[in-house]
Amino acid sequence: MEIEAGHHPIGVVAHRTGLTPDVIRVWERRYGAVVPGRGEGGQRFYSDADIRRLTLLRQATAAGRGIRQVARLDTEELAGLVAADLASGDRGAAKGPPPDPGPVVAGALEQVRRLDGVGLDATLRRSAALLGIVPFLESVGAPLLRLVGDEWHAGHLTPAEEHLASAVLHDIGADMMRTLQPRDAGAIVVVATATGERHANGALAIAAAAAASGWRVVYLGPDLPAGDIAAAARTAHASLVAVSVTYVDDGDRVVAELERLRALVPATVPVWAGGAGAERLGTRLEKSGIRVVSDLSALAAQRDRPIPG
């Protein structure tokens, strides 16, 4: 089969632009950054012009600009903007490697203290674009969420500051989950938190990472009884059930609720638990047949694993 010049699959585009495939899809679906063609089998193909535009968008966002704003520009306007950034001394930022997550988290926390929600949103979305969705969730999103929680419990953040951080992280996680959802039929994961767990951001991080890994996600939100989660898993014919446990005020109650979930979900369907609270209860949960997962990249490997009949 002869390959048409300027007719590139997404893997080639990712290699040439320095963007991850999931970021390319997000920018395409949410912001209309490019409009790829389609092959006979429905697969995306990108032109040389698409590659140039995506490269310019990466450079513009790496220089500190929001993707929402720059995606509206035509390619020549975008090229002029990037050239101006380079001329003004932003050359290193526009071509440099992805940011070190440590300073990104520290800077984000300072934006929380200033109640700078717009700046925080831009910082985190730019970090996600440069790192990729799953690395961002693991190295920036989750550490920031834990840090904000610790600072709030220690009295170093006000309730308003904690709520602002949670709201921004919630919106970003929900956007990722929606925009990355595969359109085709595929393996389904049900994501929720069990009764008593009202913190939704951990579950949203799992849902976003699952969508980025190719899962179809049924997201049920926080504070749901085990029986309802299990019923949803049966109705959706789920291949995996994943719950988030962030804080544990009563370990016995949490373990009992998740043991009930494990008993109600079909034995062939794995039940996973993630989050700081799940790690605290790790040994007890593992003994009950619930896998405690701290690495979101495990979702990609599990997606292609067949479920025994």
Image (tube, grey):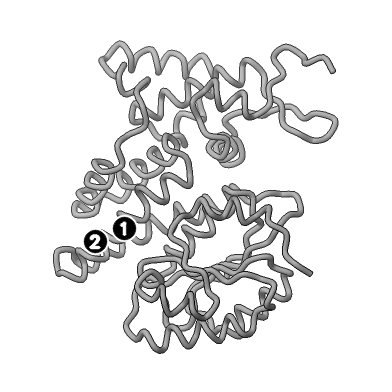
Judging by the rendered image, the residue that carries numbered circle 2 is 161
Judging by the rendered image, the residue that carries numbered circle 1 is 165
Residue 243 location in percent, x, y? 51, 70
Q: In which quarter of the image is the N terminus?
A: top right
Tell me what residue is drawn at x 43 percent, y 80 percent.
284
The crowding category of the residue bearing disc 2, from other C-alpha atoms within 10 Å (few below 14, some 14 to 19, many at least 20), is: many
Tell me what residue is drawn at x 25 percent, y 59 percent.
147
Whether residue 217 is situated above or below residue 44 in the rendered picture: below
The residue type indicated by label 1 comes to: Ala
Residue 302 location in percent, x, y? 62, 56
The quarter of the displayed image where residue 156 is located: bottom left
Decide if residue 178 is in sight here.
Answer: no
Residue 213, labelled with which disc? none
The crowding category of the residue bearing disc 1, from other C-alpha atoms within 10 Å (few below 14, some 14 to 19, many at least 20), is: many
Decide if residue 147 is in sight here.
Answer: yes
At mark 1, the secondary structure is: helix
Residue 10 location in percent, x, y? 64, 29
Left or right relative to 254: residue 145: left
User: Is 220 or 34 nearer to us in this picture?
Assistant: 220
Tell me how far mark 2 sits from mark 1, CA to CA: 6 Å
The quarter of the displayed image where residue 299 is located: bottom right
